[in-house]
């Protein structure tokens, strides 16, 4: 392997390790916690435990004006909000984490490795 190829390989390897470390840091497990959520209209409030299971539900005074479909929608909205709160900035909800993982799947490392192999075999770039 030529000095240029060795330097390119070392640079690509360093970049790959840096990307893996960044993605691992972004997706580190979070400590489970309880969460609280409220429907957008405030009709339903829900608390969930560390597993995301409903612990309590409460409704506002205006709940009587809702029909069954609206009540179900408000309750589900509050449950989802509480579960999101319990997750905090979990990797699945974090755009930064998704970007770090997507960057791992680009083809720059494969292209660099191909160039190194072509260079080692004496083929043109």
Image (cartoon, helix red, strand yellow):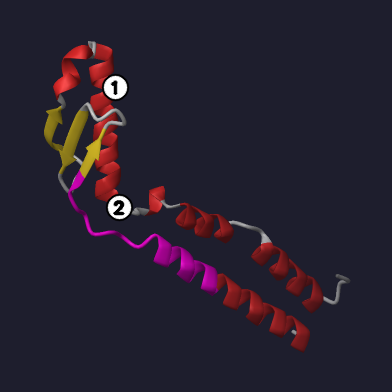
Q: CA distance from mark 1 to mark 2?
A: 23 Å
SS at mark 1 in the image: helix
- The residue lying toward the viewer, choosing from 57 and 60, is 60
Q: Extreme top residue here?
A: 67
Location of the C terminus (image quadrant): bottom right
Q: Which residue of the protein is positioned furthest toward the front in this rendering?
A: 61
Query: Quick one: 70 or 98, which is closer to the camera?
Result: 70
Give the extent of the magenta segment: 17-35
Quarter of the image where one finds residue 107: bottom right
Rendered image quadrant of residue 72: top left
Which quarter of the image is occupied by the N terminus? Answer: bottom right
Disc nearer the start of the sequence (1/2): 1
Residue 65 x/y as whole percent = 21, 13
What residue do we see at 35% from left, 54% from top? 89
Q: Which mark is residue 88?
A: 2
Q: Which residue is mark 1?
A: 73
Inspect the magenta stretch and tell me whether residue 122 lies in it: no
Instruction: Name the side, left or right, on which 90 lies relative to 1.
Output: left
Q: How many marks?
A: 2
Where is 51 relative to 63, above or below?
below
Circle 1: is it few (<14), some (14-19), or many (20+) Cα within 10 Å?
few
What element does badge 2 sit on? loop
Identify which residue is drawn at 53% across, 73% down. 18
């Amino acid at each position: 392997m030529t000095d240029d190829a060795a330097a390119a390989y070392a640079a690509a390897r360093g970049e790959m390790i840096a990307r893996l470390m960044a993605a691992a840091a972004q997706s580190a497990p979070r400590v489970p916690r309880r969460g609280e959520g409220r429907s957008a209209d405030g009709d339903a409030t829900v608390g969930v435990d560390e597993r995301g299971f409903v612990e309590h539900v409460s409704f506002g005074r205006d709940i009587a004006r809702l029909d069954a479909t609206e009540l179900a929608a408000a309750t589900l909205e509050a449950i989802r909000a509480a579960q999101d709160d319990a997750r905090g900035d979990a990797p699945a909800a974090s755009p930064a984490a998704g970007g770090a993982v997507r960057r791992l799947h680009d083809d720059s490392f494969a292209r660099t490795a191909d160039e190194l192999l072509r260079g080692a075999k004496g083929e043109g770039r």
